[in-house]
Amino acid sequence: MGLLFIICYLSICPAMAQRMDNVAEHSKYIQAVDEYRPAPGQYVNDAPEYEAGDTEDDMIRKCTEHLAGDYKHTHVVALGGWGGYITFHFDHSIANLPGERDFAIWGNAYQEMKNLVFGGMNEAGIVMVSKDINGNGLPDDPWYEISGSCDVDSIGKVIYGYEVTYRQNPMGDIPWTDSRGDNGTIDRNHYHEQEYYPLWLPDNLTFKGTRLPDNMWNLSDQVDAGWSPYYYVLVGFRYGYADNLPNFTDSSDANSWNYEGCGIDISWAVDEQRQPVHLDFIDFVRVYTGLNQKCPQPEWWGETSTEIQCAEDLHLEASLDAIRQATGIQTMDQGQGIMDHGVYDLQGRRANVSLPNKILIQNRKKFIIK
Ligand SMILES: [Ca+2]
Ligand SMILES: [Ca+2]
Ligand SMILES: [Ca+2]
């Protein structure tokens, strides 16, 4: 136990401490994107735009330019068909507050205008969370899926351990095969003339995860054919996904944030056996398209693809307070009343108080100098 504690102490705490200062210096919004691997789709290579010669790192940087910051200054990023994903982080660890939603992901879902169903353009993305256990700032630690409402509302209809592989077919429909022996295509349309296969990624892209039950209903016979000859809707799921429910509870009120519908409680995280896991903090969030379906009309909206625009910590101050309590480390400015005597490093050696970003000890209290 003692050794474990020391390992945890050395690996987790410095990373947390470096991501924590004063509230004013922190943002509740996405700081940067770590990974971007969309599946093929009509918005891929376009949101964000691929330019000749772009590498995967270039596309990740463009995603950061789209998604970092507040809602007014961010732009939609498309994840393409089933399985396509993005991973991002904040400038601090997000705490899991008991009984509360902890972060929200904003997309472009909306309520269909005839109010025939709950939702209408809901392209649910499955959310995953991860904690930077090894403290290296990279998303290379265990991942846990957020168990959304389909797990309880659609028992027997959710496909776990699903897998899809996409093949290149330049400027043509993109073929896919799945782990159940089915196959299909992501179809081209004349609204989007660019290549649909992510041009910076290799052929045979394979994605693994959970497939949510198809949510597309054909309600064409319920609307006036003069208004629209066909009317397809994507019905919303109750909670626990991205790009599933509208960002606002009242579409005419830009302050009516839909925290209930778009918020995620870290306590919903489950392991591969779908058993709850306890996470006190998370450092990385991943979102992948959870639906594998397309609208059959060639002139309609094609494949279902999750889009996200923004994400935020719903309780920034509480996250920072929780980090302070968890680490017991105070962040100090240079010259903030630290006397240059009786200061030690973690190995118990006399230390120079001007050492930046090192955990030091004085009077049995840990602190870190910025
Ligand atoms: Ca929570
Ligand atoms: Ca890591
Ligand atoms: Ca969408």
Image (cartoon, rainbow, N blue to C red):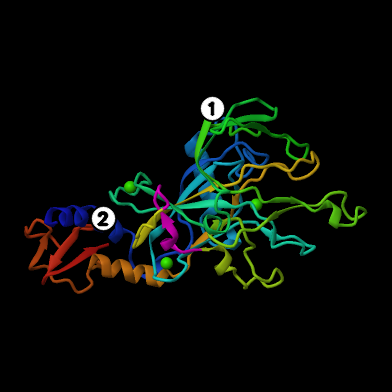
Q: Residue at x 15, y 55 (%)?
A: 6
Which segment is the magenta one?
A: 264-274
Report the amino acid beneath label 2. Ile
Disc ID at residue 204: 1
| Kind of element beneath mark 2 | helix
Q: Is residue 139 left or right of residue 86?
A: left
C-alpha separation, residue under disc 2 versus residue under disc 1: 36 Å
257 is within the stretch colored magenta: no
Q: Position of residue 224 (x, y in %)?
A: 90, 57
Which residue extends farthest front? 156
Comparing labels 2 and 1, the label whose residue is closer to the camera? 1
Disc ID at residue 12: 2
Q: Position of residue 305 (x, y in %)?
A: 63, 46
265 is within the stretch colored magenta: yes
The answer to whether residue 188 is above or below residue 64 is above
**Can residue 332 be seen here?**
no
Q: Position of residue 249 (x, y in %)?
A: 65, 70
Quadrant into which the C terminus falls: bottom left
Residue in the foreground of this view, choosing between 173 and 273: 273
Q: Counting residues from the N terminus, which is met first, the one under dot 2 or under dot 1?
A: 2
